[in-house]
Image: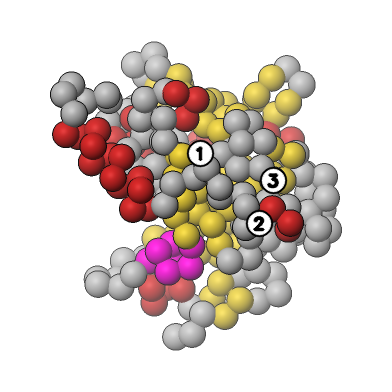
Amino acid sequence: MAVVVRKTGSIAGAHTLGIRCSFESRAGLGRISMAAVQESGAPSVIDRYFTRWYKTDLKNKPCEDHCILQHSNRICVITLAESHPIVQQGKKIKSINYQISANCSRLQNKVSGKSKRGGQFLTEFAPLCRIMCADGEEYTICSCIRGRLLEVNEDLITNSDLLLEKPSTEGYIAVVLPKFEESKSVTQGLLTRTEYEDIVSKRQSSTPEPC
């Protein structure tokens, strides 16, 4: 079945590829929902329609790795990399907080119109949320790229297990839209999949392992 991109931004027919991924919202590109559909041997929509970029050891914190899924329409989906301690160690999550400061909540973000006006502007190190784990460790998840915040994944507040079970799909953190003029340069400073795997491999062969 061919993949059809409707004016609303929906991707139809993706169930034949392994993961159904639809972008649907009042903003046209905002709301992202992903439902996993098993199909043996078929590449996933993520691998077929998104380019994976990585930011490792964010803010010099060992293994706090982020993954950025970049679509051809400029949308970037921020997720935890599979090597992030939360995912790698299967940590139990106590809470996820999108309240960044007393005056800034990512949950209050609102966008409107085709140009997505009104979205909070994010820099590379702008925090998106804070994740508190049952072992007392707290992790700050950052944007990793410059752009407008389209939305955060509110489902994580009530179902944090999605971060562990489906970090690249339903367990995504947020959706960010870079400026048009920065859409090509926004990934400068990020790692390709191959470069990322190289770093992870070197970690595993070091003694002691950094994480």
Q: Residue at x 81, y 58 (%)?
A: 115
Q: Quadrant of residue 11?
A: bottom right
The residue singled out by tag 3 in the image is: 147
Q: Quadrant of residue 85?
A: top left
One can see residue 111 in this view? yes
Amino acid type shown at disc 3: Gly
Local packing at callout 2 (Cα closer than 10 Å; few below 14, some 14-19, many 20+) is some
The residue singled out by tag 1 in the image is: 156
Q: What quarter of the picture does the C terminus occupy?
A: top left
Give me the C-alpha separation between circle 1 and circle 3.
22 Å
Give me the C-alpha separation between circle 2 and circle 3.
9 Å
Q: Residue at x 21, y 25 (%)?
A: 209
Q: Residue at x 47, y 60 (%)?
A: 51
Q: Secondary structure at mark 3?
A: strand
The residue singled out by tag 2 in the image is: 183
Instruction: Indicate left or right for 96 with 93 as reference.
Output: right
Q: Is residue 8 above or below residue 68?
A: below
Magenta stretch: helix, strand or loop mostly: helix
The tally of labels here is: 3
Residue 125 horizontal/vertical position (percent): 60, 31
Q: Secondary structure at mark 1?
A: helix
Q: Is residue 87 above or below residue 11?
A: above
Amino acid type shown at disc 1: Leu
